[in-house]
Structure formats: C-alpha cells, structure tokens
Amino acid sequence: MNFIENRQKILVIIPAYNEEESVVKVVLEVKTHLPHGDILVVNDGSMDLTSEKALAAGATVLDLPFNLGIGGAMQAGYKYALEKGYDIAIQVDGDGQHDPKEIPKLIRVLEEREVDMAIGSRFIGDSEFKSSMMRRMGISIFSKVISLILRQRITDPTSGFRAANQKAIRLFAFDYPQDYPEPEALVLLHQCGLKIAEVPVKMSERFAGGSSITTIRSIYYMVKVLLAIFVDFFKKRTLLE
Amino acid sequence: MFIKIQLIIGALSIVLLFITFELIRKERLREEYSILWLFTGAATLIFSLWPNFFLSKFITQVTGVYYLSSVVLIAFFFLLLIVFYFSIVISKLTDRNKELAQRHALLELEFNEFKRRYSPPESYQKRGLTIGK
C-alpha cells in the first residue's frame, strides 16, 4: 500500500471521556489494523480509569487537567500531531462505534483523491445505520445546510471518523470549534480553501455509554450548531500560510 | 404616549444587537453567551416596536406595571452593560483557560517522556547510585 511505502507518520487520535470499558478494545483494534501508526488517547478529564487502561493498552496518553469537551480534546490532539510533525492524523471515537478496519480506506482516499480531509460516512454505500428519528432528522438537516454552503454533497457531517493531512492538522491546531465541533469544522475547512471527500464506512453500535447527544439536548444542539455555522460566515479568519 | 421610550429602547436594542454581532465577528464573545444576548436584543426590539405583542399584554396584566420610572430604567441599563461586559471577559478567560489546559497536558506528556528516558534505572536507585556525578 502506498502510505506504507512512503513511510508517512500517522497518528490516531482517540478522544475519551469516562470510557474505560471501551478504550482498551479500540486501542488494540487500531493497533491490529494500523501497526505502523502511533496512537494518542486524549483523556478529557475522566473520573474513571480511562487514562491508566489506555496506557496499559500501549497508547500514548495525553491527560487534560479537566474536562474541556470534545472540541478542546480534539484540538489538543491536533496540537500534538502538529508539534510532533505527523503527516496524517485520524480521529476515532473512544466509544468504539468506528471500526478501525476502515482506517486504511480513509488514508487511501486522502492520498488518491488529493483532499485535505476524508470523512467516514454512514450514509453512502451499503452501510445501514439505525438510530433514532430525531437524530436522523437532525443529521439530514445538517447535511442539507452544509452541502449548500460547501457546494458539495456531504451525507454525514456529524461523523467523527476522519482523516486529516498536514494542512488540515495545522488549521485545527490553531482553530477548532468547541462544543459540537464536527459540522462546524467542515465549514472552517471550506472557508480556508481545503478540500473534503467522503468515504463509505460501517459504524457499529457503541460498546459502552450513550451518545453525548441525548434527545432532549438535540434541539439545543441543532440551534447552536446552525447558529455557529451562520456566524462563521462573518468571522474574520486568519488564513494560514 | 409611549412613543419616545419606545424609540429609545428600540434604538438601544438595535445597538445591542449590532455590538453583539461585531463581538462575535471578532471572536471576542463565545457562542453560548452570544445566543443569550442575541435573544435579549431581539426580545427588547420586539417589545418596543410592537407594544401590543401578546407577551407584553400578559406581563402588564400580571404585574400591573404600566411604565418604569426613569431611575429604574437607567439602573437597569447600567446593569445590562456590566453583565454584558462580564460575558466578554468570561469568553476571553474561557479561551485562555482552554489554551492553558491543552498546553499543560502537552508539556506534562513531554516531561514524563523525558523523565522516563533520563532517570536512572530502578536497580541503580535502590543501591543509591547516581548517574552523571
């Protein structure tokens, strides 16, 4: 495979908050499917043994002193990737819903289609994904809005299963959205002129824990993200050179 | 009769909306606070431009208050300004706090790496030997 010959430095970033039950399994699976990649578990101020278990499983662990939320945790991961000079960074959720088997596919797309970020999508190809009505509806609204802004079809803007190249790593190390960052990050990429492609992937049920988005919160989530995307249009972006 | 106060409050709410928007644009205000202020601005605008709005009638009925004395009004706007300023400061602090937490974590990781690499093996420490001296 191309990326092995090139000797690219690859980092898998796994943000985890109170996920001691699934994090070991995720780390071990990533190791099996991507033996030459490094693994960074970003422990977002967990109260359980997430950090210790991830360390025992052989990952490098970045311990945040307190809970920053998924956006702050991911950005810390990207900062690490930038400082250590990684060529590719891959986001995988710590709850085990992303199948590490698909990582090479993401990397391949990143290189062959010459994009800056590859997103694993549940909704293209043969993947059948079951989830609640509310969530499906929310995702479809985001998908329409984001597709409109980017002038490119994005089927799964909330997917946190992504691969980023050096350009995207640099951008995210300096600026990454906060509370529910996935859809907003796409707008950010677009505004800075970076390219995005989607890849069909299978996602499984979570090993443990619920989604960070409950039904009650989903409306707040929707309003907040849509407003943030709207506001992003007017923000001054310091473009990176 | 209330046309003057209506205009003043209307103008103030427009100014409030504009300032909020400017601050968001310059990234001086975090979103969770900006939503609150945008709603506040929109609400005061609606109440001032549209006095027969069903909510204002409801409030009048419940409280029996038909107009606010100017003192209360001035005090209210000063409080509004102060609270507004606080949200700006908190926004800035939250961002700095986040940066600090991330830097702290990255440095700690680096530090542990060095410690592991350069500290003498345990067998040496047990025998009271030091390296480098």
Image (cartoon, coloured by chain):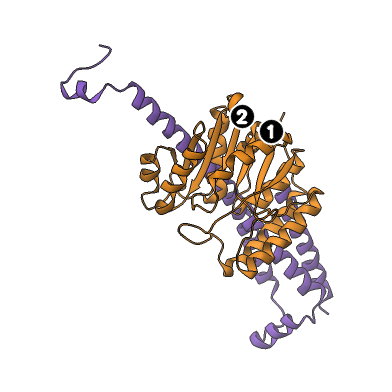
Chain colours: A orange, B purple
Q: Quadrant of the N terminus of chain A?
A: top right
The residue identified by callout 2 is: A3
Q: Which residue is drawn at 63% across and 35% down?
A: A169
- Position of residue A9 relative to residue A172, above or below, is above
Q: Residue B38, image x and y in percent? A: 71, 62
Label 2 and label 1: CA atoms lie apart by: 8 Å
Q: Residue B2, image x and y in percent? A: 81, 77
Q: Residue at x 63, y 41 (%)?
A: A105
- Position of residue A122 relative to residue B73, above or below, is above
Of A99 and A92, nearer the camera is A99
Circle 1: is it few (<14), some (14-19), or many (20+) Cα within 10 Å?
some
The mark total stands at: 2
Q: What residue type is labelled 2?
A: Phe
Q: On the picture, is B66 further left or further right than A210?
A: right
The residue identified by callout 1 is: A111
Circle 2: is it few (<14), some (14-19), or many (20+) Cα within 10 Å?
some
Q: Residue at x 69, y 76 (%)?
A: B68
Q: Classify mark 2: helix, strand or loop.
A: helix
Of A96 and A74, nearer the camera is A96
